[in-house]
Each structure stands twice: as structure tokens, then as C-alpha cells.
Amino acid sequence: MSKIRTFFSDLWYLRKTLLINILGVIVLTFVLVQVLMWSLSFYTLHGESIEVPDLVNMKLNEAEKLLATRKLDFVITDSICKGNSSGGIIKEQNPRPSFRVKESRKIYLTITRHSDCTVNLYYNQLIGRPREYVVRQLQRSNLKVGKLTYKPGGKAENTVVEAYVDGVPLFIEADPNAGEKPPTEPKKIPQNAVVDLVLLEGVDALPQYIPNLICDTYGVAEFTIKGSQFNLGTVHIQGVVNDTLAAWVWKQSPSAGENATMGSGIDLWLMSEFPEGCKEEDPLPIDEDDLGDDALYEEEGND
């Protein structure tokens, strides 16, 4: 009998000891987890964050002071042409304004340069070159092609003989018979400047046919005009047009099929609604062999 009592007494002691140990492990684990969470919260400032201020169009020195008050740092990752702005003006930031970050986080900035961005253009890049070559050179230099003016003569059609920026001569073809020599020094041109060109019609130049632009969007019509050796004339807007490139051409002057000299202007009338009498058709497949030089050039220039 005593042995049975001893057995049950030992069994109860073991169960009690086991339960105490299990409870002890649970309590210790809970305490350790709480301590770990508290430590992480303290280390990472959990629940605390700083709102990133709007720095765009702010001067760099002003932004530096503002970021310092919020215990944030900054890194300049890029600089761009200042254009009409002053140098040292913030144009982009990352993270964006109102984004919440931790203390000491770096804000990455793009600012304007203190000097104008310019492009060096040389005489032999433009003068005596075909129009397609010159347009490609200008676009690669972040310059824009402006008005195309044609004058009679010349053996090769579409040869550039003069270039102007804001009406000021950039380069004019040198006359060897008058003892003139082509300049070798480059001209510095601001990026995004518009360069107007004077080209030769060619010996056998004939009047060009005005393309039909009605029912085209403005973007397509502009592309067609430039590729047909004409200039875009006056653009008339009918009603409210929110997206000019997507607006529809419902009238043009001169009319399609008329003859005009190269470089003539074509006036367009635009509207937001699809013009009456136009048919919406699926685009036809394009055969690269049928593309003209201008279309191929434009495609290459966009690469």
C-alpha cells in the first residue's frame, strides 16, 4: 500500500514540476519577445516617421536648411539645363513630397546647372548637306528644326545652304569665287534652340502637290507636312481642344492636290470631334519598301 502511495506521490510531483517548467518557459518566451520588440521599436523609431517636404523649385541652400530641421539628408544625383530658371534650383526629388521616412533618410535631388547647356555646331555639319542629314544632326544635338525656306537653283535638291537662329545667321554657304572660306570654329547654340534652314530647290525642281490632311489628327498632319517639304502654317482651333496632337483636321489651305513651291505653308483648322464625312478605317499594313526616305529617316531618328 505504501508503495502505491509513493508512486502516485512521485507522479504528482513530476506533473507539478513539468507544469511549472512549461509555464516558466512560456513566461520567459513572452518576456523575451516583449524585450526584443521594444528594442527593435527603439532602434528603428517604430511608429515615428518624418514627412518629406516639397523641395521642387526651391533653392538648394534653402532646401538644405529645411531638411536639417527635420533631421534629413540629401544627395544630388543629377543636374539639368537651367533653361529659364536660375542655377541650383531643385527640379526633381525622391522620395516625393508628403512621403514619410525615417530620420537621417537621404533625399535624392535633381537640380539645375549654374551655366547654360550649349551645343557646338560646325559649318560642315549643316552647309552643303542634304536636309535629312542636317535634321538628324540637329535632333541628335537636342535642337529643333524650324522653318524651311527654299530658293531656286542648285544641282542637288534639298541641300542646306543657310542656317539661322532667331533670325541671326548661324552659317551661310561660303563663296569660293569671292575668296570666302568655310569657318572652322564651332558656334555655341543653347539646347532646344530652333534652327531655321534655307535649302536649294534643285535644277529640275517642280512644284509639289499639297497632301490631303483632312481627317488626319494634328500629329499625323504635322508629320506629313514636314515629310512633304512644306511648312506648317497657321493653326486654327474650333471649339475646345484639350489635346492638340489628337485633334482632327477638318479644313486645310491650300487644298489637297494643288501645286505649291517647296517650303510653302499649309494652314490647318482643328476640332476635337471626329469630322463629318470621314471614315474610321483600320490602318493598312505598312510595307517598308514603300516608305519614303523622310519616313524612314523619321523612324530612325526616334530610335
Image (cartoon, rainbow, N blue to C red):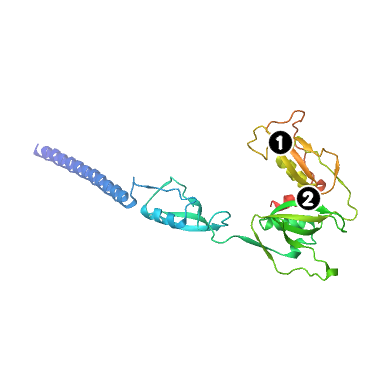
x and y percentages locating residue 234 in the rendered image: 73, 42
Residue under numbered circle 2: 294
Q: Looking at the rendered structure, which numbered label has been put on residue 270?
A: 1
Is there a contact, CB below 8 Å, between mark 2 and mark 1? no
x and y percentages locating residue 26 in the rendered image: 24, 43
x and y percentages locating residue 14 in the rendered image: 17, 42
The residue sitting at 28% across, 48% down in the picture is: 38
Q: Looking at the rendered structure, which numbered label has been put on residue 194?
A: none
Q: Quadrant of residue 84?
A: bottom right
Which residue ends up furthest to the top in the rendered image? 276
The residue sitting at 79% across, 38% down in the picture is: 253
Judged from the image, the secondary structure of the residue bearing numbered disc 1 is strand
| Sequence order check, earlier mark of 2 and 1 | 1
Q: Quadrant of residue 137?
A: bottom right
- Location of the N terminus (image quadrant): top left
Please tell me how crowded label 2 is: few (under 14), some (14-19), or many (20+) other residues with Cα within 10 Å: some
287 sits to left or right of 193: right
